[in-house]
Image (cartoon, helix red, strand yellow):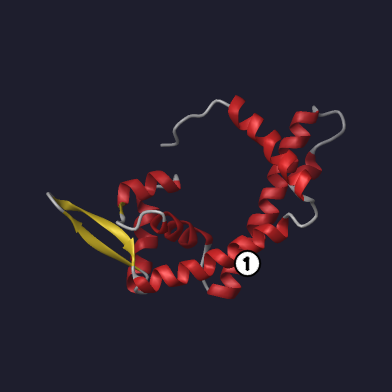
Amino acid sequence: MDLEARAHSEHPDELRLWLRLLTCTQLIEKQVRNSLREQFTTTLPRFDLMSQLERAPEGLKMNELSRRMMVTGGNVTGITDQLVTEGLVERVDVANDRRAWRVRLTPRGRKLFNDMAQKHEAWIVDAFAGLNSKEIAQLHKLLGKVKQTTPTTEIA
């Protein structure tokens, strides 16, 4: 049973909408996870970490990676260790701070990430194939309004 099936007609429309958004997100994420595993033998957290590094060619400190990914430092360390072993990322010393290092994609890691990112984009586009361009623009605009009126808090 998906989350949306738990809602009943007596529940507020807002709750039913929230559950539909969650269900759609879970369905799309499941497809992306499966596709990453099947086509690239990787996981979504590894893809996410590489995505953050792709946006920062000079690399990122571990605490910055953790903050951007909204996960604990331990999670980032474990994924980074795996990617270093595979030659996809490297650790580089930080000048004036012997306790820290930056993590950045290797050329091999950048090539693999670019291949994955192209496929990822196609999977997401395919997930919304049931909507025309006008519907996509309308949904994007409406969700933008929700985003603007929702209070945000920093995730620790």
Q: Considering only vertical position in the picture, is 8 above or below 69?
A: above
Q: Residue at x 78, y 35 (%)?
A: 16
Find numbered disc 1 in the image and state the secondary structure of the residue it sits on: helix
Q: Residue at x 43, y 61 (%)?
A: 50
Q: Left or right: 25 with respect to 101?
A: right
Q: Position of residue 83 (x, y in %)?
A: 37, 68
Q: Residue at x 72, y 49 (%)?
A: 24
Task: Sort mark 1 into few (<14), some (14-19) or many (20+) by Cα contacts within 10 Å.
Answer: some
To which residue does mark 1 refer? 34
Q: Quadrant of residue 154?
A: top left
- Seen from the viewer's position, the closer of residues 70 and 58 is 58
Q: Considering only vertical position in the picture, is 6 above or below 77?
A: above
Q: Position of residue 109 (x, y in %)?
A: 40, 70
Query: In which quadrant is the C terminus drawn?
Result: top left
Q: Considering only vertical position in the picture, is 67 above or below 60?
A: above
| Amino acid beneath label 1 | Asn
